Image (cartoon, helix red, strand yellow):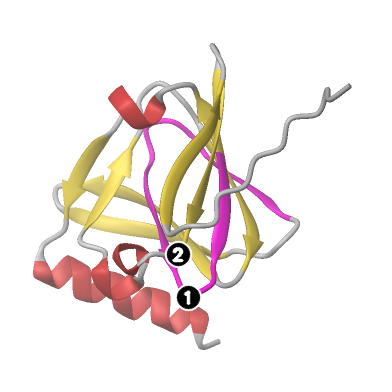
């Protein structure tokens, strides 16, 4: 009798692999578009918090407040075994290095209809890269 379901995401990118009526579990594995030098936008969810858990590798969780195109960041170099929560209505992104894997838990179907993007200007991209690189090299 098999009563335990198992899930594993081994390819690059995002995979929401366990979706119920109320919540979903997804895994984000490193992909070139998740690297710091590829980030050109932040995203936000209006209906749900989003929980992040580093499985392995190196990743920086980026949270941001935007007011009049001025961005203030709260950056966290993620550590395995720590659960991170981004509250709803907070802009965010993850900068991942090769081999990074992050588990994501949020309301069901958030990846389909509860997100918006804020596209960064070239100056904002450069500022973000500088701040993240300073955190990684500490």
Q: Do the residues labelled 2 and 1 touch (CB within 8 Å)?
A: yes
In the image, is residue 4 part of the stretch drawn in magenta?
no
Q: How far apart are marks 2 and 1 (CA)?
A: 6 Å
| SS of the residue under disc 1 | loop
Image height check: is 102 above or below 51? below
| SS of the residue under disc 2 | loop
10 Å crowding of disc 1: few (<14), some (14-19), many (20+): some
| Residue behind mark 1 | 98
Residue located at (62% from left, 47% from top)? 8
Q: Position of residue 107 (x, y in %)?
A: 50, 23
Q: Is residue 114 visible?
A: no
Magenta stretch prevailing secondary structure: strand
The quadrant in which residue 73 appears is bottom left
Q: Specify the farthest residue to the bottom.
A: 137
Q: Can residue 134 be seen in this view?
A: yes
Task: Tell me the magenta residue range.
Answer: 82-104
10 Å crowding of disc 2: few (<14), some (14-19), many (20+): many
Residue located at (52% from left, 30% from top)? 106
Q: Where is residue 6 in the image (x, y as percent from the top left)?
A: 71, 37
In the image, is residue 103 part of the stretch drawn in magenta?
yes
Image height check: is 125 above or below 91? below
Mark sitting on residue 30: 2
All told, the count of numbered labels is: 2
């Amino acid at each position: 009798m098999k009563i335990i379901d198992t899930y594993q995401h081994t390819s690059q990118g995002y995979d929401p692999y366990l979706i119920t009526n109320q919540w979903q579990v997804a895994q984000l594995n490193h992909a070139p578009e998740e690297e710091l030098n590829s980030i050109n936008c932040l995203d936000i969810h209006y209906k749900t918090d989003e929980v992040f858990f580093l499985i392995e590798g190196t990743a920086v969780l980026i949270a941001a407040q935007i007011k009049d195109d001025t961005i203030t960041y709260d950056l966290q170099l993620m550590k395995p075994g720590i659960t991170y929560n981004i509250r709803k209505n907070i802009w965010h992104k993850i900068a991942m290095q090769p081999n990074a894997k992050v588990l994501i838990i949020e309301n069901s179907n958030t990846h389909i209809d509860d997100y918006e993007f804020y596209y960064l200007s070239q100056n904002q991209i450069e500022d973000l890269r500088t701040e993240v690189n300073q955190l990684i090299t500490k």
